[in-house]
Amino acid sequence: MLAVAVGGVWFYSVRKTNELFDMAVNAHINCAIDGNYPRQTQKTEMLEGLGVRFAPMLQPVLDSAGLNYAAVAAHRCDVAGRAWVHILLRKGSTLISVLLTMRGSEEGFPRAGRSLHQGSRDGYSVAAFESGAWLVSVISALPGRQNADLARNLVGRIP
């Protein structure tokens, strides 16, 4: 009986994590890969793109990314009926999405004690975590370890 209960919890955990990954990858494809983002060249334009409420999200992402990444755009978007704060970076020719969305009351990564969740979807590396009221995802075509390193640098920095 215990094995059935543990198996059910494991199945739910995997399914929930997959759903959250899928949402973030869809947002990455819609904005970054399909080119549906503003062409911004100045940090002030990015701050304006985020708006007053979300502008404080930009600097922690830039600080975490460091000199190996260039800021490309920052905006708010809606993909599949869900609101996102989207900060787009570039490393070489690879676009990296840092996506934040408000966590719903029943949403979250179900594995307690584990701050960073990693996987891949449709050829993209995904690393995600919870930060207060936010679900934060980093999605790119970088190798999984590089993608996860950027996400790991963000843990604890998102207000």
Image: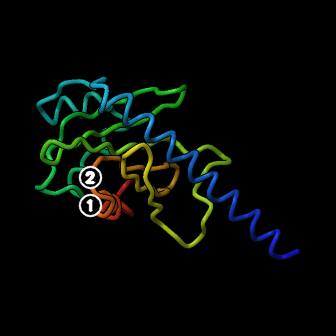
Image position, residue 113 (x, y; %): 56, 73
Q: Quadrant of residue 45?
A: top left
Disc 2: CA contacts within 10 A as few (<14), some (14-19) or many (>=20): some
Q: Quadrant of residue 146?
A: bottom left
Q: Amino acid at mark 2?
A: Leu
Q: Is there CB contact under 8 Å for labels 1 and 2?
A: yes
Residue 140 in picture, x, y percent from top left: 31, 47
**Residue bearing the label numbered 1:** 146
Residue found at the far right of this picture: 1
Q: Is residue 6 left or right of residue 116?
A: right
Residue at the image point whose x is 45% and y is 57% from the top: 119
Q: In this view of the protein, which residue sits in the foreground, 131 or 13?
A: 13
- Whether 139 is drawn above or below 149: the answer is above
Residue type for callout 1: Gln
Q: Mark 1, residues whose alpha carbon is within 10 Å: few (<14), some, or many (≥20)?
A: some
Residue at image point 47% right, 56% down: 131
What colour scheme governs how the chains and residues are painted in the rendered image of this protein? rainbow
In this view, 96 is above or below 65: above
Judge whether 152 appears above or below 27 on screen: below
In the rendered structure, find residue 142 and report the number of the disc placed on it. 2
Q: Residue furthest bottom?
A: 2
> Image quadrant of residue 150?
bottom left
